[in-house]
Amino acid sequence: MKSKLLKILIAVFAVCLVAPAFSAVENVKVGGDISIYGVLRGDFDITYTNEDIHFFQTTARVYVSADLSDNVSTMIRLINERDWGYANTTTDIDLDLAYIQVKDLLTPGLNLTVGRQEIQFGEGLVVGSAYNAYNYPVSLVAADLGLQKAFDAVKVDYTATAIPLSLTAFLSKINEALYDDAGEQTLYGINIGYKIADIADLEVYYVRSDKDQSGNDITLDTAGIRVVSRIPAVENFNLKAEYAKQFGDDGTNDYDGFALLLGAEYKFAANMEPAIKLNYLLLSGDDTPGVGDNEEWQMVYPSNIGSRIGPLFYAYDAWNIGIGETNLQILNLGLSLKPVEKLSICLHGYLLKTDEKVSGYDDIGTEISLGIEYKHTEDLTFGLSLGKILADDLIENNGGDDAWQAVASMKVAF
């Protein structure tokens, strides 16, 4: 597989280099990025009596994009993700992106994108990634650090010229069945955006999935509204709110879950660029599982999960408890500043609770995370992330302890 994909990339690159001499290739770009992590995680693996784990992990991507004539462009990106020397490590190269895009198709502002591509509504509460740490396609010790997100999809985008209106609609094939519908899964979505002067951005969306992420037959509809607002009287003060409601059924019970996201951010006009964030996330739980309507929020295909529920809790939960992005209440307070030009520091606290009790408990714990980033050059960045979970009833009841992590990173883009 690796050799075939390498040959494909070499062939595409060679064609792009010679094509301008005899075809309508207008621009070719070649680039990529490499991210290398050194990870220490303590009291992390409760299967082995909370032993510490330590490892190195690398993600490498390379892409070739070409702009052709008549507003046609293409993108191919390959990716390798692996742990150093671990038994499950692989040097296989996977297809990360591969799409064709046509801009201003039939009418100005109408774009068509077909193939393997990244799709995100808003900040990814409902749709943003085909994969996350709970269902990652590559065997990684830290799947929470994985970068693969793309959907195999057909997507249409439209931006109106006369009014500040935009529309995105897509169809993604998650699983295909050639001869019957058994095991087939399709994801549909539509998002309508409207800009209200310079005050707010409004989005309304609808998403349907005909199976859950375990492959069970369902009808899951999710409708939502999102507002991001700026306060004209207070510069650099932003508010956001998003609410999503679920409908449909699993053949036995109706879905009745919901999600609520509220946030505020203020950037001070002062030296060192200090900023403060406050966010609240509620993902509904079911007070009587298996009885009547299912009131628990059903995870669709979200992205940026760690930034909402805490990067350490996201990793720890995927490794151990397995709650997923559901039945949660998260209160997040974040502070950031830039002491010098190339150095950024952020400190976050996350208060973690369930919405409905699990095994008689609703207190999960508190996460404290510190992030330090040093931009050595325009292309090279060093980072250090430190985090600790102060475990409460739910983690302790599952055999866990006060988990911690230290993640050093080195990232370059070219």
Image (tube, rainbow, N blue to C red):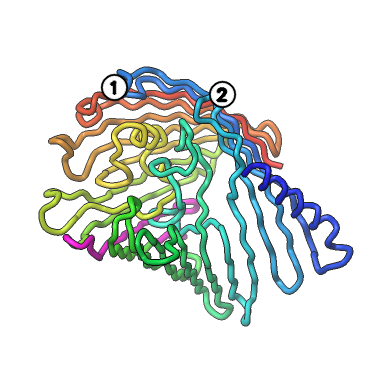
Q: What residue is rendered at 38% in x and 42% in y?
A: 134
Name the quadrant containing residue 271: top right
Q: Is residue 233 magenta?
A: yes
What amino acid type should be assigned to the residue bearing mark 2? Gly
Q: Residues within 10 Å of mark 2 (few under 14, many from 20)?
A: few
Q: Residues within 10 Å of mark 1 (few under 14, many from 20)?
A: many
Q: Which residue is mark 1?
A: 401
What residue appears at the point 40 percent right and 52 percent down from the top-left corner?
A: 302
Residue at screen point 32% across, 43% down:
324
Query: In the rendered view, does 53 fall on the left or right side of 223?
Result: right
First reached walking from the N terminus: tag 2 or tag 1: 2
Q: Is residue 360 left or right of residue 386?
A: left
Between residue 105 and residue 340, name the one nearer to us.
105
Quadrant of image for the C terminus: top right
Residue 192 placed where, x, y %? 44, 70
State the quadrant of the N terminus.
Answer: top right
What's drawn in magenta, residue-wise?
227-252
Pointer 2 with pointer 1, Cβ within 8 A: no
Which one is nearer the viewer's eye here, 252 or 33? Answer: 252
Tell me, for residue 92, which label it has, or none. Answer: none
What amino acid type should be assigned to the residue bearing mark 1? Asp
Using the rendered image of the protein, determine whether residue 411 is visible from the camera's viewpoint.
yes
